[in-house]
Amino acid sequence: MCSNCGQRCRGRYDQRRCRVRDLRVAGWMVYLEFERWRVRCSGCGGVHVERLDWLAQNPRYTERFALHVGRLCTSMSNKAVAELERLHDSTVKDLSKLYMQEQVRRAGRLRPRAIGIDEIAVRKGHDYRVVVSDLDQGRPIWMGGNGRTQADVEQFFAQLGSKASDGIELVVIDMWRPFRNAVRDKAPNAAIVFDKFHIMRHLSKALDQVRRDEYRRLQGKDRSWIKGQRYTLLSARENLTLEGRQALKKLLAANRRLNTAYLLKESFGQLWSYRTERGARAFFERWKQSLRWQRLEPYRKFAEMIERHWDGIAAYCRPENKVSLGMVEGLNNKIRVIQRSAYGYRDEDYLRLKVIASFLPPLPENARLHPH
């Protein structure tokens, strides 16, 4: 039957000789030559070519060769695959797209229960894209928008659909107001939890400001203890070398105010270990009391910020909201590695597909890249 006019094709038949690339054999490049039937429909005048299941969507390659190239692209850069298989970069990109599109198709429809929303810079100049992750499956499920506004996040909910959006129970975000507004408008049944690592980043900035203030206040030898110790002071103790730990010990012993600020920062992380809001609130009140008479203005401002956003922090104390708060930041670090491997391509759709498919399982050996 003709796909255009719906009538049985009764036109002129002929054969066309074709040549396609197949898998290597013993290191030799293999090409297959065959004849393919074509028919010209007498009803609409269209030309239809015989469908062959073992050919890829790109008719110059067999499907198993396209599957092979796509699988290589999951662990190698496109440039390396092109050099290995003696293909053009654009060809590798097209075959990789076929592979990743099938990965996404097999993943099925999105029905997330808990999601994380964050932004990631795609290039210099504050050019951001929103990344939405499924926290239960531990993978990104959407990347898009043209910035980090409320409208950008609402694009995800529009694609997800109102029914699936209503089924979202938990959203982990930073304290960026447009993200909160979008979640409250489009996912009204979801509890909002603020990401621990974004909050601790604000506290690290407060500690760094205390360091700067102390450096400006002191003179002579007292200032020399602080100079050049920013990384030592802001890094986690377990990430420091033996020399770094010794330098940190000397720094804290030489400056009482920095020692107090450092201990307060290290202790604040206990806030997320409480299982009840009452216990978390009691801890925070004690932590605020520790700021009295310390003259730590950046910490006082940080405490006021926590007060304004307390609901999104206390929500994590509920048992049903206990998810990995570090997952969103961990996924973003992996996405940055993927970005570096995709440099050279200005196709943002390809980058989005690369980000989402990189966290999906590889296709089986007998997979079909374009099932009919």
Image (cartoon, rainbow, N blue to C red):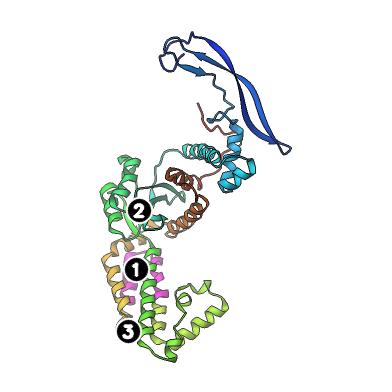
Q: Which of marks 1 and 2 is nearer the N terminus?
A: 2
What main secondary structure does the magenta stretch of the protein show?
A: helix
Q: Is residue 109 left or right of residue 149?
A: right
Amino acid type shown at disc 2: Val
Q: Which of marks 1 and 3 is nearer the N terminus?
A: 1
Q: Specify whether residue 354 is in view.
A: yes
Residue 160 at x, y = what percent? 35, 41
- Magenta-drawn stretch contains 284: yes
Amino acid type shown at disc 3: Gln
Residue 23 at x, y = what percent? 66, 34
Label 2, label 3: how far apart the Cα atoms are: 36 Å
Residue annotated with mark 3: 294
Name above or below for residue 193 compared with residue 260: above
Q: Earlier in the sequence, mark 2 or mark 3?
A: 2
Tell me where residue 63 sits by quadrant.
Answer: top right
Marking on residue 186: none
Residue 53 at x, y = what percent? 57, 25
Residue annotated with mark 2: 171
- Magenta-drawn stretch contains 172: no
Residue 2 at x, y = what percent? 45, 15
- 304 or 65: nearer the viewer: 65
Amino acid type shown at disc 1: Ala
Label 1, label 3: how far apart the Cα atoms are: 23 Å
**Which range of residues does the magenta coloring cover?**
265-288
Mark 1 vs mark 3, foreground winner is 3
